[in-house]
Image (cartoon, rainbow, N blue to C red):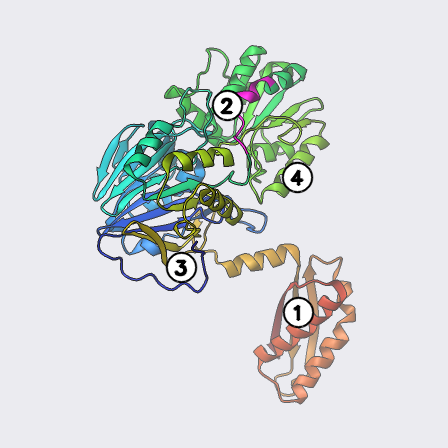
Amino acid sequence: MSHPHPELGTPPALVDGALRITPLGGLGEIGRNMTVFEYAGKLLVVDCGVLFPEDHHPGVDLILPDFEPIRGRLDDVIAIVLTHGHEDHIGAVPYLLRERGDIPLVGSRLTLALLDSKLREHRLKETPRYVVAEGDRQTFGPFDCEFVAVNHSIPDALAVAIRTGAGTVLHTGDFKMDQLPLDGRITDLRAFARLGEAGVDLFMVDSTNAEVPGFTTPERDIAPILDRVFAASEQRVIVACFASHVHRVQQVMDAAVAHDRKVAYIGRSMVRNMAVAGELGYLRVPPGVLVDGREIGGYRPDELVLISTGSQGEPMSALSRIANRSHDSVRIEPGDTVVLASSLIPGNENAVYRVVNGLVRWGARVVHKGNALVHVSGHASAGELLYCYNVVRPRNVMPVHGEMRHLHANAELARATGVPAERVVVAEDGVVVDLHAGVARVSGKVECGYVFVDGSSVGDITETELKDRRILGDEGFISVVVVIDSVTGKIVTGPEIHARGFSDDGVFNAVRPQLEEALDVAVREGVRDSQQLQQVIRRTVGRWVSATYRRRPMIIPVVLEA
């Protein structure tokens, strides 16, 4: 088995007749999914999504894939194929189109409709597009793509089989094998088997639930739980879920109808996405059920269901603002019921629990995955993955979509079904895999980092700046100003010490004598350069704070001459 390795060098030129696969996001993380396929001098991009920031990304709104490895070859990109409409698969498309605005977009009807509303927000011009459905087959340059229905937590999801002269790749996208889905659209295992019979040279498989044994719980199992929650609620019910989870919204809508409640969407992305899903017929909204979120004040609490964004504790989301009592039109009252009908994405735990605690503080009853079956996963568990490996019988396997533990668990499943260990490639973002003569091998690595979006700024924030922000937030900030005589080097004024993150500036009285002595010693030894004196200040204060408080604050020394 091939392992990602930090010492991997730049990949060599692609051998004639080989297919190169370069993941630029989604391998080693949940989100930012983007894979580039190269064959015969052309590039095909599959998915282009965002990653949502965690607590250690202060001030960051979104995280994008790094486009740098293909920036010099954007003219060779012949299409962007989108497997489904979740943000972690389509959210970065507008940022790639800023760099070349006429790249053709390929996806299902719902996927492209959700993307269209996003492109309008970014004020991007109309781009060429191909609306595809399961069973369709389209050729883009040297890539022959066949689309296969898969079941996921959003309608219209597709797997894609990519045929080239180097062989056939089957990319599952995100999928599960719900046998009784709400929309009746199951994962097309007959197509998987047919492709397997013809020969799948590389199987790229969703790894998110590879550690979970058995089969994923069907979506419809949530309905009885929602019904009981609604029946027990005497005031408002607020349900938070992903703004693209049409199936979950449909179940909430059905429960609301059964209990004679009106429904209002709360949160801009929820309003936008559900309008699109309703217009296209993917969401069934009975007449008279939907009300404007700005008019909910005209209804009794027991007449309302609010469907909100913010299930991951995002600071500016509707649910977070509701929990903070800063929302314009929704105010939590004792007796309200809040349902978190979504998964807990790794890294978001603290943010979600902050929101839950805020809601409980105001008297809400909070129902979540930990105390009721109000969420089921959209991803295949280990039993389903084993089933797929046995149906497809691939020659090579490359786990995708997941943290490293998920990728390795998926690799173990592939080996357990008989895929030779040396044919199971565990890669990470930037690791280049070449498929040649029926064998997939790691051939090198390209530089591939995180690109941070901060407001309207894209890529201006560096890891160093983020580290500074984390230090400021966690460890504090100290400024030290000293004025010295330009002739004698003696201290004329100061040191003046001001800080944030400490009880008060008076705590630094203890370090002033040490600082004055250290500066005096440095001057006697002939040190007069202001930068060197700043280093003396930084070292002296830093040692004292570390010994006294076990902290490493940001220290900004300023040395002025008089």
Q: Which residue is mark 4?
A: 354
Dividing the image into 4 quarters, which one contains the C terminus? bottom right
User: Under tag 1, what secondary structure?
Assistant: strand
Q: Which residue is mark 3?
A: 447
Alpha carbons under labels 4 and 3: distance apart: 36 Å
Q: Earlier in the sequence, mark 3 or mark 1?
A: 3
Closer to the camera in the image, 8 or 355: 8
Q: Earlier in the sequence, mark 1 or mark 4?
A: 4
Closer to the camera in the image, 47 or 537: 47
- Nearest-to-viewer mark from 1 and 4: 4
- Nearest-to-viewer mark from 2 and 4: 2
- The amino acid pointed to by label 2 is Val
Residues in magenta, as a range: 214-224
- Nearest-to-viewer mark from 3 and 2: 3
Alpha carbons under labels 2 and 4: distance apart: 24 Å
Q: Label 4 crowding class (10 Å Cα cut-off): few <14, some 14-19, many 20+?
A: some
Q: Earlier in the sequence, mark 2 or mark 4?
A: 2
Q: Label 3 crowding class (10 Å Cα cut-off): few <14, some 14-19, many 20+?
A: few
Residue 154, by quadrant, is top left
Please state the horizontal and vertical placement of residue 433, each as a whole percent of the image. Answer: 35, 53
Please state the horizontal and vertical placement of residue 198, each as a whole percent of the image. Answer: 28, 36
Please state the horizontal and vertical placement of residue 340, each as a whole percent of the image. Answer: 60, 29
